[in-house]
Amino acid sequence: MTTSAVRLYRKLDGLFCVYKPAGVHWKLVRDTIETTILKGINALPAPSLPKEVRFLPPSSAVAAAERAAPSPSGPETTAVTRTETNVVARRTPTWVPVLSKHPLVTGPEYRRVRVAVGHRLDAFSSGVLVLAVGNGTKVLNEAHTSAVTRDYTLEGEFGTATDDFSHQGRVLERATFGHITLEKMDRVLAMLQGANQKALLMYSNVDMKSQEAYELAAHGLLGPEGKSHPILTGLRCTHFQPPNFTLEVRCLNETQKYLRKIVHEIGLELRSTAVCKGVRRTRDGPFTVEDALTHHQWTSDDIIKAVRHYHATKKSKRKMTTDKLTATSASQTGEERSAL
């Protein structure tokens, strides 16, 4: 018979995402989620204790024997012994709980929960962080080997160069930025995106003249096989007010340090310098900022809702893909019949 804690743990089996704030290490987020889940599971009512049969004397008889018992020496010793014998003889079988199975003795039912982290964020970055509980870790491992893109918002500032490409690093150089315009910025971004597009085609190992390449590109599935160098599949400027600017980036196999370096290289291409003031992930595969649980939502109930939403979305996408393939095969069969 499954307990309420086991049933709750099964409901948590899957993927969900949280919003990691800047300045917090991803390990602290994972440990906090794990502790929250354990507290929620172990706070449920414990199952009733198992019972066993024991032969217990009636409490009234025992109390009477104790009250009537004189000193162990003397002529009354024989009478006391007879009284104790009668009490033992009158013991009756009784069902009593097994106290050795009590939670205060055995401890909590769950002491560890498997919580895995997807594509990590460093301590200075914020945004969507995908987590897996239970068997969801298998799906997370499959996502690592697939060409899943992620979206970022990068906050940059012209005029300064640092040793780690961020505004918190040691300043190495300062430069002017009055000559930079939005048109120049767009030309540099187009150049970078074109270079990365060539790299994407090179690492994909697919003949660009084949039907397979066309279908993969049409469905947005064209990408490198396995691990490769970081690749930018999309890059555009959404805010330009020198010295500050904002970029939206879509990429594969990236790191946050690489994205900060991209901001630095854009500054160099514009004959200036630039540092990255913030990195924020807005999407990781199917998970977006709207799906992410904020810190006050890191509870068992909210995590269960997020996992259910993920399973429902996945099921609907699978159904849509099946219906689309069925419609395509039916249209091809109709065309073949009309040709005959």
Image (cartoon, rainbow, N blue to C red):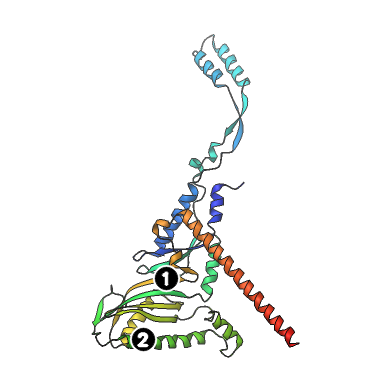
**Which image quadrant is residue 282 in?**
bottom left
Mark 2 in CB contact with mark 1 (< 8 angstroms): no
Q: Which type of secondary structure does the marked residue at label 2 adopt?
A: helix
Report whether 121 appears left or right of 273: right
Check the image and name the residue furthest to the top.
Answer: 75
Residue 284 at x, y percent in the picture: 46, 71
- Residue at 47% x, 86% y: name it: 197
Residue pointed to by mark 2: 186
Q: Residues within 10 Å of mark 2 (few under 14, many from 20)?
A: some
Task: Report x, y in % for residue 2.
Answer: 60, 48
Q: 323 and 208: which one is in front?
A: 323
Residue nearer the viewer, 111 or 8: 8
- Which numbered disc, 2 or 1, marks the residue that appears first in the sequence? 2
In terms of image quadrants, where is residue 214? Answer: bottom right
Q: Is residue 185 visible?
A: yes
Q: Which amino acid does label 2 sit on?
A: Asp
**Residue 246 placement (x, y as % from top left):** 34, 77
Q: Which amino acid type is marked by label 1? A: Thr
The local crowd at label 1, few if under 14, some if 14 to 19, many if 20 or more residues have their Cα within 10 Å, is many
Q: Give the spatial CA distance, label 2 vs label 1.
A: 22 Å
> Residue at image x 36%, y 86%?
186
